[in-house]
Amino acid sequence: MRWASHPAPAAYAEAIRTDLDGQAMRSWFDTRCVGDVRPGDHAWLPYSGADERDHIVGRFVAAALATREKLVYITDADPDALPGVGADPGAHLASGQLSVLPRAHACLDGYGAFDPARLAATIEREVAAGVAADFRAVRITLDYTPMLREGGLPGLLGCEDEVEHTVAPSTMSMAVCQIDRRACPPADLAALAGTHDLRVEPDALYDDGTLRIVPTFAPRGLRVEGEVDAARHALLGDHLARAVAAGHGVRLDCARLDFLDLAGFNLLIRHAEALRPGEALILDDLPPSVENVIDMVGWHRLPGLRRGRVRVPLDQAGEVLP
C-alpha cells in the first residue's frame, strides 16, 4: 500500500482560520453544491450535526438512485434509515444499484480496528463492479468520524491519499467523505481538509445568476448572495417567511451580498417584526453599504434586527475568505 507524506497537522492548522461559529475556512479548496459533484471529484463534508449531514448526503444519494448510477454507502446503519434512499430500498439493493457495506466488512481488520488498506481495496473493488455492471458512474460515501477515533489521524490521512488516487483520475467514480467537525480537533480537521480539493455544501434554494439563497446549518439560517432588487423581493420574502415560521429566530449570512435596495431593507425589518418575543433576525458579515444604512437609522430603533458576527477583513486575516 502506498502511504502519502503529509505535512504535520499543525502546518495545516496555521493555514486555516476558525470563525465565531467554529467553521474552518481555507483558501485552497473549492466549494461546490452537492448537486454539482461529478466523476473524479474527491470531496469532503465537515458537518456540524445530523440534519446538515443528512440534508447534503441525502441529495448525493438520491441523485445516484434517480439515474443509472451505483451508490456505495459504507455504514452500519440500516438501508432504510439512510438519507436519500427512500422508504423501500429493497429494489435498489436487489439490482445492485445500492450497496450498503458494514464497516466490519469494508474497513475493519479481524480485531475490529480501522484498516486503511482494506478500505482502499473495498472502494477499488466496488468501482470495478460498477463498471462491469455498466453503471454510468459510481458514488461512494462514508463517515470517517468513528475511524478517526479507532485508527488515528496518520492512518486516515494515508487512506485518504489512496482514495484520492482511486477517485481523482477516474471518469466513473466520485466520493463524499463525511466527518463530524465537533469530534475532530482543529489541527486534525485542517489536515483532513488538505487531502481534498473540494468541499460540498447544500444545493441552493434559489439561484437565477443574480440572487442566490443557500441554507446554512451552523448556525441555522440562510446565506444570501448577489443582488436583492425589486424583481427579487418576493423570492427572498418567501424564504424568510419559511425560516421565521420554523422558530428560534433567523440568521442571514450576508458576506456575499452585493446589493440590497431600500425596499429590500424594509423587507428585512418587516420579517424581524414578525418574530416571536425574544427572537431576532441576526445579520452576519454585513457589507459596509448595508451596515452603514442601519447605523444611520440606529440599531436601537430596529429591535428585531441584530448585528451578528463580523469577519476579519482580508488584509488582517491574510487569506481569501469564502
Image (tube, helix red, strand yellow):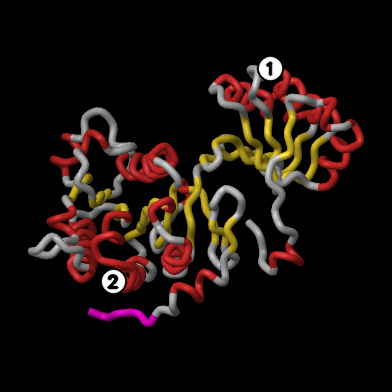
Quarter of image, res 235: top right
Residue 181 shown left or right of residue 229 in the figure: left
Residue on which the image places disc 1: 274
Q: Are marks 2 and 1 in contact (CB under 8 Å)?
A: no
Decide: few, some or many residues near mark 2? Use Cα within 10 Å; few <14, some 14-19, many ≥20. some
Say which amino acid is labelled 1.
Ala
The main secondary structure of the magenta stretch is loop
Earlier-in-chain disc, 2 versus 1: 2
Measured as percent of width and height from the top left, residue 41 is found at 42, 61
Residue 122's x, y, as percent? 19, 62
Please, what secondary structure does the residue beneath circle 2 have? helix
Q: Quadrant of the C terminus?
A: bottom right
Compared across the picture, whether 315 is left or right of 171 comes to right
Write down the region rendered in magenta.
1-5
Q: Can you give x and y, in whole percent of width and height, for residue 96 in the image? A: 17, 46
- Residue 93's place in the image compared with 171, above or below, is above
- Please report the residue visible at 74 percent of the width from the left and 38 percent of the height from the top: 307
Quarter occupied by residue 154: bottom left
Q: Residue at x 40, y 62 (%)?
A: 42
- Which dot marks residue 246? none
Residue sitting at the far right: 296
Circle 2 residue: 155
Q: Residue 127's quadrant in the figure?
A: bottom left
Gap in angstroms between the C-alphas marked 2 and 1? 51 Å
Give the camera-side residue of 79 and 184. 184
The residue type indicated by label 2 comes to Gly
Find residue 66 and report its horizontal and vertical position in percent: 33, 39
Q: Residue at x 57, y 48 (%)?
A: 21
